[in-house]
Image: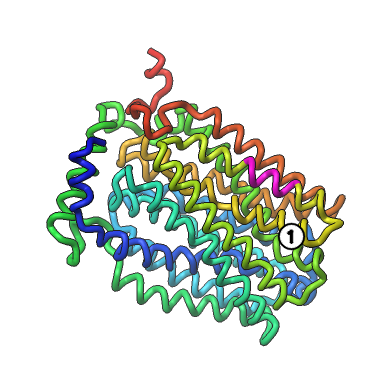
Amino acid sequence: MTNSSHALQADIPRQRWLRIIPPILIACIISYMDRVNIAFAMPGGMDEELGITATMAGLAGGIFFIGYLFLQVPGGKIAVHGSGKKFIGWSLVAWAVISVLTGIVTNQYQLLVLRFLLGVAEGGMLPVVLTMISNWFPDAERGRANAIVIMFVPIAGIITAPLSGWIITALDWRWLFIIEGLLSLVVLVLWMQTIYDRPQEAKWISEAEKNYLVETLAAEQRAIAGKEVKNASLGAVLSDKTMWQLIALNFFYQTGIYGYTLWLPTILKELTHSTMGQVGMLAILPYVGAIAGMFLFSALSDRTGKRKLFVSLPLIGFALCMFLSVALKENIWLAYAALVGCGFFLQSAAGVFWTIPARLFSAEMAGGARGVINALGNLGGFCGPYAVGVLITLYSKDAGVYCLAISLALASLLALLLPAKCDAGAQPNPTVNPHKRAA
């Protein structure tokens, strides 16, 4: 970017940061709270009342991601060609109903069905919101915008941990699901009154900001546009080797993320022998660290243009802290410090990672591409919790945690092996078919 374009950008109003990011962030926070509150409900009495073993707990935590597959690609396409606003609005209604029903289950099989349905209802969310972000933020801002939105994970953790601990202690685990379900309806009202899909639709935006966004985003599309991209099918995208690297990387990353997230309250309870209220407070610090990590790595990546490096570094840091949390378990506070370190690296790679599809695919294809990467990658969200549950049953909790560390190390290696054009300093290549590229 030239000095003159830097000066021009500095004169452009930045209302989009205040008007678009907060409602998207809040909707994502609610979805994540509904997704992970089971992590607190299990050690908070649900496992005992419903007779749930460690393996079944892992299955209940992970089956969400089987349902999560179904609306990924449709969600991404709806956001590109239709209304992401309406899609998320209906999703919020479904999250509320399913969460409340989870609070009145009477056996583990009802729980499995509702967890699966919650996965279906949440499946389109991430590709939809990432597509909405790409409609509002040019490439130079997208790493930071993605990182702020993906901060829903640590922010939801900071809110959910003490809130869940308090509700379980004051009431019981059933009220945890009912109360958090009703919060979805509150957020629905906020969402429908504040969000817009595209700059052209917003009533509050200035002409200067609207023109800047429309022209800049159109120029970016022209830079990666080509006849092959315009006519590309999803099959052509799936034939790209890099696409499968991104899917595999996301799979191993999500295995680590959700293995850690869904077992953290149980690990903390056993490590410290605390009450659920105390576990809720101890679980805050890893998520506070996650916010710092996300800001640090996304800012470094945007400043340097190095996407591959700043995906790989947090992943290897996450793997190392995961390993140390077991290796240092004889000292409670050193093991806890390692778990906080896991939190620091938990989502640090995510904001940077999601800038990469926009450099490889046109806007028309990027929505579907994000959906495929997120859908197949998030099967790791099933494998992580379930693998830990099985390994706890067969061997020990240590074996489960080591499994997550290995998965994260593999993700870090895959990030380093991505092609050079993933970095912001490289020239995007519009071709999506590797055979034609070689020709």
In-image side of 168 versus 21 (left or right): right
Q: Is residue 319 magenta?
A: yes
Q: How many marks?
A: 1
Q: Nearer the viewer, residue 295 or 249?
A: 295
Q: Is residue 343 above or below residue 363?
A: below
In-image side of 75 versus 163 (left or right): left
Q: How is the image coloured?
A: rainbow
Quadrant of the rendering where the N terminus is positioned: top left
Residue 291 appears anywhere in the view: yes
Quadrant of the rendering where the C terminus is positioned: top left
Q: Is residue 174 above or below residue 217?
A: below
Q: Give residue 37's position: percent from left, percent from top.
A: 62, 69
Residue with the mark numbered 1: 336
Other residues around mark 1 within 10 Å, as few (<14) / some (14–19) / many (≥20): many
For the view shown, which residue lies furthest in the left direction?
207
Q: Nearer the viewer, residue 69 or 148?
A: 148
Q: Give residue 324's position: percent from left, percent from top.
A: 76, 48
Range of residues picked out in magenta = 316-323
Residue at position x 68%, y 50% in the image: 384
Q: Quadrant of residue 129?
A: bottom left
Q: Is residue 331 magenta?
A: no
Q: Give residue 261's position: percent from left, percent from top.
A: 65, 59
Residue at position x 69%, y 69% in the image: 282
Residue at position x 66%, y 77% in the image: 165
Residue at position x 29%, y 73% in the image: 193
Residue 371 appears anywhere in the view: no
Dot 1: element: helix
- Under mark 1, the amino acid is Tyr
Q: Nearer the viewer, residue 212 or 370?
A: 212
For the view shown, which residue lies furthest in the bottom direction?
170
Q: Give residue 296's position: percent from left, percent from top.
A: 49, 50
